[in-house]
Amino acid sequence: MAQESPWEITLNSKLCKKCNLCVAFCPRKVLEGAGSPIIKDPANCTGCLMCEMHCPDFAITVRRRDAK
Amino acid sequence: MAQESPWEITLNSKLCKKCNLCVAFCPRKVLEGAGSPIIKDPANCTGCLMCEMHCPDFAITVRRRDAK
Amino acid sequence: MRKEYRLAGEGGQGLITAAIILAAAAAEHTDLNAIQTQSYGPESRGGASRADVILSDEDIDYPEVKTPDVLLVMAQEACDKYGPSLAAGGTLIVDTTYVETLPAVEATVVKYPVSQRAKELGREIVANIVALGLLVGVTGAVPPEAALAAVLARVPKGTEELNKKAFQAGLDAAKEVA
Amino acid sequence: MRKEYRLAGEGGQGLITAAIILAAAAAEHTDLNAIQTQSYGPESRGGASRADVILSDEDIDYPEVKTPDVLLVMAQEACDKYGPSLAAGGTLIVDTTYVETLPAVEATVVKYPVSQRAKELGREIVANIVALGLLVGVTGAVPPEAALAAVLARVPKGTEELNKKAFQAGLDAAKEVA
Amino acid sequence: MRGAKLLQGNEACVEGAIAAGLRFFAGYPITPSTEIAELCSLRLPQVGGKFIQMEDEIASMGAICGASLAGLKSMTATSGPGFSLKQENIGFAIATEIPCVVVNVQRVGPSTGMPTSPAQGDVMQVRWGTHGDHEMVALCPSSVSEVYTLAIEAFNIAEQLRIPVVLLMDEIVGHLREKVDLPEPSSLVVRDRAKPAKAPGQYKPYEVDKDDPAAVPPLAPFGEGYRFHVTGLSHAEDGFPTNSVEVAGRQIERINLKVTSRAKELAKVEELYMDDAEIYVFAYGGTARSAKKAVKEARAQGIRAALIRDITIWPFNEDILLRIKGRSPKAVIVPEMNMGQLVLPVKRVMGDACPVIPLNRVGGGFIEPDDILDAIREAK
Amino acid sequence: MRGAKLLQGNEACVEGAIAAGLRFFAGYPITPSTEIAELCSLRLPQVGGKFIQMEDEIASMGAICGASLAGLKSMTATSGPGFSLKQENIGFAIATEIPCVVVNVQRVGPSTGMPTSPAQGDVMQVRWGTHGDHEMVALCPSSVSEVYTLAIEAFNIAEQLRIPVVLLMDEIVGHLREKVDLPEPSSLVVRDRAKPAKAPGQYKPYEVDKDDPAAVPPLAPFGEGYRFHVTGLSHAEDGFPTNSVEVAGRQIERINLKVTSRAKELAKVEELYMDDAEIYVFAYGGTARSAKKAVKEARAQGIRAALIRDITIWPFNEDILLRIKGRSPKAVIVPEMNMGQLVLPVKRVMGDACPVIPLNRVGGGFIEPDDILDAIREAK
Amino acid sequence: MALDYEKYLRVGKLPHIWCPGCGHGIVTQAIIRAIDEVGLDTEKTVIVSGIGCSSRASGYMNFDTLHTTHGRAIPFATGIKMANPDLKVILISGDGDAAAIGGNHLIHAARRNVDITAICFNNNIYGMTSGQYSPLTPMGSYASTAPYGMVERSFDLCDLVSGAGGTFVGRSTTYHARHLTNVIKEALTHKGFSFVDALSQCPTYYGRRNKMRTALDMMNWFKDRSVPVSSWDKMSAEERADKFPIGVLRKLEAPELTEVYAKLIERAREGGRA
Amino acid sequence: MALDYEKYLRVGKLPHIWCPGCGHGIVTQAIIRAIDEVGLDTEKTVIVSGIGCSSRASGYMNFDTLHTTHGRAIPFATGIKMANPDLKVILISGDGDAAAIGGNHLIHAARRNVDITAICFNNNIYGMTSGQYSPLTPMGSYASTAPYGMVERSFDLCDLVSGAGGTFVGRSTTYHARHLTNVIKEALTHKGFSFVDALSQCPTYYGRRNKMRTALDMMNWFKDRSVPVSSWDKMSAEERADKFPIGVLRKLEAPELTEVYAKLIERAREGGRA
Ligand SMILES: Cc1ncc(C[n+]2csc(CCOP(=O)(O)OP(=O)(O)O)c2C)c(N)n1
Ligand SMILES: Cc1ncc(C[n+]2csc(CCOP(=O)(O)OP(=O)(O)O)c2C)c(N)n1
Ligand code: SF4
Ligand code: SF4
Ligand code: SF4
Ligand code: SF4
Ligand code: SF4
Ligand code: SF4
Ligand SMILES: [Mg+2]
Ligand SMILES: [Mg+2]
């Protein structure tokens, strides 16, 4: 089983419009989906924020678990 | 007595506003004056049109005598 | 007799086109008077949208639909929003592909998986035409030939066959669910 | 008593300034009411221009000068244009430096080479103030002290002495020609 | 385009305009008028005409003035904010007597307001929006087929009177799709501006006809040798600026007289049940549809109501009101999707003859037939 | 600036405005208003204020809206063509309730017209120039000293009602130099806009007061932590766009009510010889000076004439007319340097009580006292 | 690190009105991220916008926000900045808003060098009114008012603002979200008028009509065409064809309007020459 | 050879309203001389102007002439040219008219490359309204609305039009009347939008306030500051300070609007894609 990543990915489904840009921009294939994106492989996440920064809907955020 | 120049200088006093730009721009000192310009030395005229082209009032024209 | 139709769903489902075709069918191929209106603007971008049609053999003075006699719903949000507007004794046509919960209305309810059927025909994009066939079949709003002629006049070139099939599928469904 | 003054000449002669000074003298140094107006626009660029003043111990309702009681003319064109407007029995003050032909008017005519006198004082530019002195002297429109105070308040710094002289020259001329 | 058709109001505007000879459109998109520009961009080149989307509404208005001077029948279309911006150049067209048509599809104001909701808030602006003294002609359709015919009419008036004419629609009528039976092209009356009969040397673009002070001087197109001057400065008959109060005044009076003297010819109105009426509903545009329904309903209930549907809203149709003023009316009800605009001249003309009752709604809501019916009942 | 002074109308406007607290002026030169901009460029920095000449009138109007939101009392000045251009942003100020003062020094229109000649042709435009439903407050001075006091008044009204107020001058008054006795600064009443008492979280910039539907919500300046939203879209109490007919409608009604409910307080009028009058002259602005002279003259000739000099021309002063309507007037004469504008509401209010006689002149000519006197004599 | 949306957005107003895949949300996010990284005071920052889909951004941003008339945001912003130079003024505009109806205000703000950061959400189309051409629509492409293809040439906004005298000009795209954020940061710290041409996608009205079916297609188009300014400077004219530079394209020092005006006030108060 | 004023001017309207020494008459003469030398048909040439002293030129010129509203001449001209592409359209404008209120139309005409020759009578002041500053008034100089000296930066009109995509940009001055005529001739023969920045003097409102007492002083100022473009290109930044280039500064080929539109009409009539 994959090790837990230090990055917490949060998807706000009330805001998500299912454009899948987050999926397309994730360099680590953490995300997947045709409609609502699915966080498929969270352990792979490097916290690069490509998903967050390319989300037009403020719907996906990536945060260090240890950050307060 | 100076030879007659082939150039005919015409001053339209109804239009002239006495700015004396014609006087200032004549390279041959043909024109003179502080108020209305005076055609002082017509023989000296070379037909360069500097006076005509710098007159803001369409008031001075230079034409070849032999032209019709 | 004035009869009011409302086609409600989401942006992109082509319901405005369907409403225009319905009105055009009546206007251009029958003696009925016809009016078509719709919601515009922010209201129509995302969320529930609607397109309305009024058909009548008299002059249609007031052009707004307040309490449709026939309501077609192709999305849950649209159903929730416009369901209550249905006239008592009217007809509710439901695309069960997307609408699960029905409002409590005093109406004839017709259910059919419209979008599902369209997908089976090859492209979900023709769900609006399936729905139109269903509506025409169920309500007799206009003669089917009139509706079909209007369909063929208004769909993109090259898609005539598919749309014809879709319309027929809707008509057939009407018999099925009747 | 309402009294109307018109100062007419060419653009650049400073007659608007003279009119403003006359009105200001009355407004700021006497109990009279005062109004000053002038021609604006294309009319005032080149050609004849005018500046008017009304002084009165009553309210001045109507602000325009139609038939001035006193007309000062400092250019021939202005004289030709405004001469006829002079009220019967009025006073025509003529700068003979530039005006040769006088209109046929029923009026007291005062002639003086105003601009010539200004040149003698050093700069023709103060002809307007010579004219003002003359006008004040001839008509008693305002007390000379009031006019002088207004002159000194409105001319450019550094030119006070010259203008004072010019004004006095006008006053003196008034006695001369009286 | 023959036979019964389902057309949108905005589409009917374009088709009517083209039938009237429109060959140049300049515009700037704005809801709810945009379909007019869009359809012009498609349709005009098909008939050899031209479309341009300018950088703003000011430029659009300027461009149609230029194109009209170059000889093409020209139009622009907009809504409230754009109509405000066009005002200066509308004034230019009035002052220099350039024929053109300006469409305003009204939405809720003031300011950006509600772009997709209907209103009739620009009725007074149409009349008074530009500075200085001027008259205006504005036509106000209530149905899609009327949009078509009034678009033609607007061009005919514009060309004949050398004025900008406003086709004042509202979002209801502009966006409505409705069955229309377009007239045969051969049945249409299409008028063109008069061209000068005089030789270039004699031509006076602003000539005052001594026998007919309301006469419209002919307009030469640019490029045909007349070499005349057009200016928004007050000008003399020859078109050149004047500072004469008399000359300028006479021209201002003439351009007003062109319209006021023709008020009767221009007046278009639909009357319903007028013969024995006591209560009159005075309505126009989209609201008149509700009014008609209400009046029919009132009649069905035995109330002697009548509808006056004003079509030519400017110049204001005083005659029809003067006519009913003499018949001891009980009330005139004026429903408007605004705070009360055309009700003001209605009151002025009705004087103290009877109550004039405004019925207003703002915020983008329709005035319902029932609202009007209630008012009729109350006035009874 | 104390004691008797000879001041030009345009100068008095600037001095009055500064006395009222003007600290930001944005404008674009145009005859006959330009002296206002010129003097502001000189005077404002002396009092720590700011002047900017914008690229056009649209931008000037936008800039003063911005500056006002940032907390400064703001003004612009223009004449007809520029006033037409400002209309869209005037509508924005109305809709978003931004206090500011707009000066229009009228010249002859339409279009470029006669830039240096007087007219009163923008009277109706002031009221109706921008699209959509709105009310307007416009003050109309007849003398230089009144320019000064009305400039102050304009600011006071603007700040208190959160509206743009128009100071409607004409070329006569703007260019006139006249003796004025400026009031002591300490004697001036200067009002500032209300600032919110509520904390930022609670603040609603467009709050509807249930007890007082005409109440004016306070306005927070930008930069003080309120972090609120301002939009020309129809908005709710919190300032954010709404599509609700009810919410939008209520706001439109409220901003109109701010003015209409205060019509009586706002009404300013000078009355002369009203007690026993039969014939009334209703005049304003520069023309009222001729009217006053004519009325005095008529009295001298034993004619019972009176002058109603309207100062607050908008909202229209119905009360004074309703008062005389009850006294069986013989006639109301309305002299205007236009084709007949304010005479329209005069007629509306007077109804069928007596003839309302327009007396008009266009083309830049004054209406002479004798013209009015003749009309009085004829009406007798 | 994730951005604190609660701090910079009016989260209660979300979801926003923009279509799925619309680039405007990405640009808006870049702006607030830049604001965050630069550390602007949210109470002293004012957002001013015009009219358009893009200009709706102001309503979602938790500052003093002003949604003006179409094309006129800059004059309003100029008034605010002149009135209170302590405020940071950020301007949001669409390509139609900024360059069609608002073009004059844009060039004059650049000329005046008034301290405003203007960000143009450039999707080369009028989104709000459903897809008419804008002055940024490329020749030949389709729009609802260009049914036969666009016949007008388009602006290069960076050239335009530079030609007007702009002292800071930058460009980036939604594809380059991080780069875009950085360019905006540089703009925010520039003294004077700074302009950022932020290429954004309108899949609904531009993409679909022009054979780019998805937002991603459009962003990939940005990727393929853009060249960092450092490389751009070394490219030949042929190499440049169909490409455009991104980055900070121009930055120069010049007197800033409100600073110069503050000095003028000092002089005036001291009774200086008038 | 003397120009035939009777042919090109409405001599009956002379003398004109311009002040003694005003440069606008010199520029007007240069235009008609260029028209004459290029051989334009006076019946197929339209002169369009805005509002200002300069824009009054149209009234004296014996063509179809249109004196429009302030700043708006270009849209009117665009309408004329679109409506009848056979007409030669020449535009006359002041610096205030063209670049202040009319700046947007200027840049859009440049972008569209519509075949109009625009000549700006640039006297860096508002003459008609008595000397307020314009966007061309140099920083520091005095104007009736700049009593403490101009605080705003000024445009370089040639840069502005170039930045907007203009395909022909030239500059000359009244001092260089013959050169000015030649630049206008080149502009008139260019296909597309051509722009000439014609420096002109306003002795009445600019000169006097700024220590140039006479028209001649101002023209000499033009002489001293101007550099032929051929030399300019070789000058260093320091050498360029306080100087400006004259001549044809930019000339490039690009599709002209009305020509492209004519082809669109052909396509549309053939039932091409819509
Ligand atoms: C004066 C005026 N004219 C036109 C409009 C209509 N309008 C609203 S937004 C818009 C264009 C928007 O395009 P852009 O600025 O590029 O923004 P986008 O929607 O593409 O983000 C137009 C023409 C308006 N609101 N006001
Ligand atoms: C809409 C509008 N605003 C302002 C004016 C006033 N105005 C007339 S000409 C002018 C400026 C003229 O300057 P410029 O274009 O440089 O021409 P110049 O007189 O210097 O030749 C102005 C502001 C106007 N006529 N219309
Ligand atoms: S990018 Fe944002 S809106 Fe799009 S699918 Fe991902 S989370 Fe949803
Ligand atoms: S932070 Fe980077 S790696 Fe992690 S999910 Fe987002 S895009 Fe993928
Ligand atoms: S033509 Fe030349 S030489 Fe002759 S007078 Fe004129 S300027 Fe002098
Ligand atoms: S240049 Fe012309 S106007 Fe000036 S003095 Fe000579 S002839 Fe007269
Ligand atoms: S229409 Fe275009 S610009 Fe507007 S929200 Fe949709 S995608 Fe974005
Ligand atoms: S004011 Fe200036 S620009 Fe105007 S005519 Fe006089 S000198 Fe020429
Ligand atoms: Mg856009
Ligand atoms: Mg100039």
Image (cartoon, coloured by chain):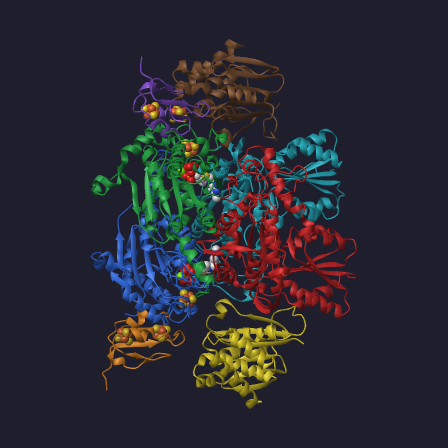
Chain colours: A purple, B orange, C brown, D yellow, E cyan, F red, G green, H blue
Task: Name which quarter of the figure residue G151 lies in.
Answer: top left
Asked whether F327 or E347 is in front, the reply is: F327
Task: Name which quarter of the figure residue G117 lies in.
Answer: top left
Q: Is residue D160 above or below residue A43?
A: below
Q: Is residue E133 above or below residue C49?
A: below
Count the numbered circles shown: 0
Horizontal relation, residue D19 to residue H212: left or right: right
From the top left corner, tell me how far across and down residue F117 is, in percent.
Answer: 55, 64
Asked whether C1 or G253 is in front, the reply is: G253
- State ligand 7's quadrant: top left
- Quadrant where the N terminus of chain F sits is bottom right
Asked whether E190 or C160 is in front, the reply is: C160
Horizontal relation, residue C71 to residue G9: left or right: right
Q: Is residue G111 above or below residue F375?
A: above
- Quadrant where the C terminus of chain F sits is bottom right
From the top left corner, tell me how far across and down residue F272 is, in percent.
Answer: 73, 63
From the top left corner, tell me how far across and down residue H216 is, in percent.
Answer: 33, 71
From the top left corner, tell me how far across and down residue D132 is, in percent.
Answer: 54, 80
**Is any atom of residue G155 visible in this view?**
no
**Is any atom of residue C40 visible in this view?**
yes
